[in-house]
Image (spheres, rainbow, N blue to C red):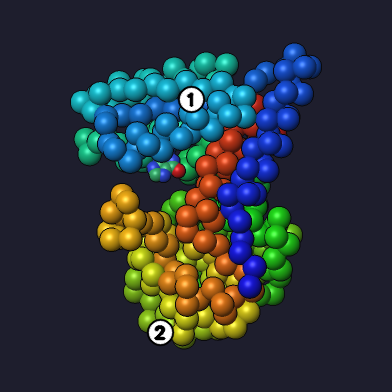
Amino acid sequence: MQLIDGKAISDQIKVEIAREVEQIKKNGGKIPHLAAILVGNDGPSETYVAHKVKDCEEVGFVSTLLRFDASISEETLINEIKKVNANSDIDGLIVQLPVPKHISEAKIIETIDPAKDVDGFHPINMGRMLIGLPSYISATPAGIVELIRRYKIQTSGKNCVVIGRSNIVGKPISNLLAQKSDFGNATVTMCHSRTKNIEEICRNADIIIAALGKPEFITASMVKDGAVVIDVGITRIKSEKTKSGFKLVGDVKFDEVAPKCSFITPVPGGVGPMTRVSLLQNTLLSAKKIIYQ
Ligand code: GUN
């Protein structure tokens, strides 16, 4: 069994990005600039955005955090997004989700210029990805693909089971693994809450991507010997064994599943750090005008 070390890979990628930024600086080029919009004071969102700003600092990017009160109107927020769209100094824009209930998430996402949509949530980027055109790929699927590439995990002709059908993980990763590409050509089955015989489907999988958000859902009896298991889940549960009184668990019962696997991601330290670094990679792509000229 080989542990997929997302933390080590993400650290390595950050070093690679920081080196590239140094080179850009030397050549008098444009330093990548990420803007993040945060509406209100949602606790987890505050943490996520703080991480994103810190990650930018670490690799030498410029970042701008735009904060608005939870009472901001949809129209005003849309105008603020349009200002960022028009600001040629800003390469990437994310609006931290969720936004307050009186604001339409779909409208907000569709207002972001697709060329600055480094979250890859805009329907134009989703659509372009679906048909294999260059696009921003949302952070978690992009991170999973990067792990598959760097660990040289074979996907061609493999049975891959994705559990979860969210717009930001299940749907895009299912599509990417099925595409004609170095990290694709898999036979993909997408499972969800209405899927029957999920245990049996999993037992037949060469690769399992668990992204359903149910702690320790995948047990040893659902995994065949030698399978690759990628755990996207991250849930905070109570624990008497830790100082904080909480621990993070994935969608996979790690201790019993790991011995059966050829590769497995831990939680924490697997997919999570890759998700963070993917946003930096997309911002760099945007500054270099790789996806959209
Ligand atoms: N909320 C939870 N995850 C994400 C993410 O990846 N991007 C944004 N913008 N909001 C989120």
Of labels 2 and 1, earlier in sequence is: 1
| Residue that mark 1 sits on | 35
Residue 141 sits above or below residue 125 on the image: below
For the N terminus, give its image quadrant.
bottom right
The residue at the point 21 percent across, 35 percent down is 102
Q: Position of residue 154 (x, y in %)?
A: 71, 68
Cβ of mark 1 under 8 A from ligand 1: no
Please rate how many residues cluster around mark 1, counting C-alpha atoms within 10 Å: few if below 14, some from 14 to 19, many from 20.
Answer: many
Q: In which quarter of the image is ligand 1?
A: top left
| Distance of label 2 from label 1 (alpha carbons) | 44 Å
Q: Name the residue under label 2.
A: 197
C-beta proximity under 8 Å, tags 2 and 1: no
* Local SS, label 2: loop
> Count the marks: how many?
2
In this rendered view, identify the residue nearer to me: 215 or 184.
215
- The secondary structure type at the circle numbered 1 is strand
Disc 2 C-beta below 8 A from ligand 1: no
Which residue is pictured at 72% across the width and 18% down the height? 25
- Find residue 47 and report its horizontal and vertical position in percent: 37, 36
Q: Please give the name of the residue rendered at 43% of the width and 78% of the height, measured from the top-left corner.
A: 219
| Quadrant (top left, top right, bottom left, bottom right) of the C terminus | top right
Residue most extreme to the top: 28
The answer, for residue 233, to whether it is visible in the render is yes
Q: Residue at x 30, y 60 (%)?
A: 239
Where does the image place residue 152, in percent across and percent down from the top left? 73, 62
Image position of 282 with respect to 206: above or below: above
Q: In this view of the protein, can residue 163 be seen by the observer?
A: no
Please tell me the numbered disc located at residue 52: none
The answer to whether residue 181 is left or right of residue 213 is right
Identify the amino acid type marked 2.
Asn
87 or 207, which lies in front? 207
